[in-house]
Amino acid sequence: MLEASLNKVEIFSGLINNETVNSLKAFVNKNLQIIYSPGMKVYKDKTESISFSIPLVDKENESDGVIKWINFKSNFVKTLDDQSFRQLTVEVSNYPDKIKLREGKGKKILMYPFSSYMVHIGAGWTIEKIEMYQKTDNWISFKQVYDYAIVFYLPGKREFCIHTDEKEKDILLLRSDKNFIEQIKGKGTVGNTLSNGLRAR
């Protein structure tokens, strides 16, 4: 999307909009146990999928089940100058991405096929903080700014990260190894930090 023009340098913005950022803040202080996808490939150091979906539950009335889904996807963007980038997109929805739901006992139940990634066995971990990472690519006639990774901070200095794949245009990767996550962080800068207090872009 063309956002602005400054000194004849076009700026292409691929940043997650403020409305969605505010929805992501609802995860802070919420328990996280399982991440869903329409199909995962699990490797030793990463989990791969075309999308990931995290349920957002009303903490005060969890018996009513999920109230929203936060869906993460990779968006391959090609610019007018034949350059390209892989943007992390986040959307708030009533449904998980590419997973069907059916009504059952007052709740919407996921229908197979789908995959699940167990973040923690048991009651789940509370999300303490979320950081969103962005890249800026500078070219002669334009620059592009876009989100590429999101890091969730959990108790006990644990972290997991959802980020775009530099090689595969429609693939997202999920990692929990801190060494890999530090490498991913080092490829860009923090664009937004979500905690008890929201720091806007």
Image (cartoon, helix red, strand yellow):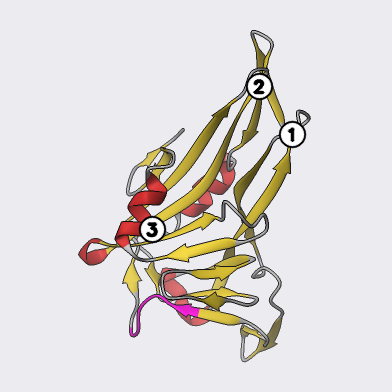
Q: Is residue 57 visible?
A: no
Furthest residue in direction left, as rendered: 156
**Amino acid at circle 3:** Phe
Residue at the outermost right position: 80
Say if 10 sits above or below 31 in the image. Answer: above
Q: Nearer the viewer, mark 2 or mark 3?
A: 2
On the image, the x and y values in percent for residue 44 come to: 42, 75
Q: Is residue 50 left or right of residue 117?
A: right
Q: Nearer the viewer, mark 3 or mark 1?
A: 1
Q: Is residue 183 visible?
A: yes
What residue sits 71% from the left and 43% below the top?
77
* CB within 8 Å, label 2 to label 1: yes
Where is mark 3, residue-wise? 152
Q: Where is residue 175 drawn, in percent x and y?
A: 42, 64
Q: Position of residue 153 (x, y in %)?
A: 32, 58
**Residue 80's image quarter?**
top right
Where residue 19 sits, quadrant-wise, is: top right
Q: Which residues are magenta?
A: 117-122
- In the current view of this chain or complex, which residue is farthest to the bottom? 105
Instruction: Indicate the secondary structure of the residue bearing disc 2.
Output: strand
Which residue is more in the foreground, 36 or 29?
A: 36
**Of the image marks 3 and 1, the number of the one nearer the N terminus:** 1
Residue drawn at x 69%, y 86% as measured from the top left: 103
What residue is disc 2 on?
142
Q: Amino acid at mark 2?
A: Phe
Residue drawn at x 25%, y 65% is 155
Checking the image for residue 79, the label placed there is 1
- Judged from this view, the residue extending furthest toward the front is 167
> In the displayed structure, would residue 17 be above or below residue 55?
above
Residue 6 on the magenta span: no
How far is mark 2 from mark 3, CA to CA? 31 Å
The answer to whether residue 91 is left or right of residue 80 is left
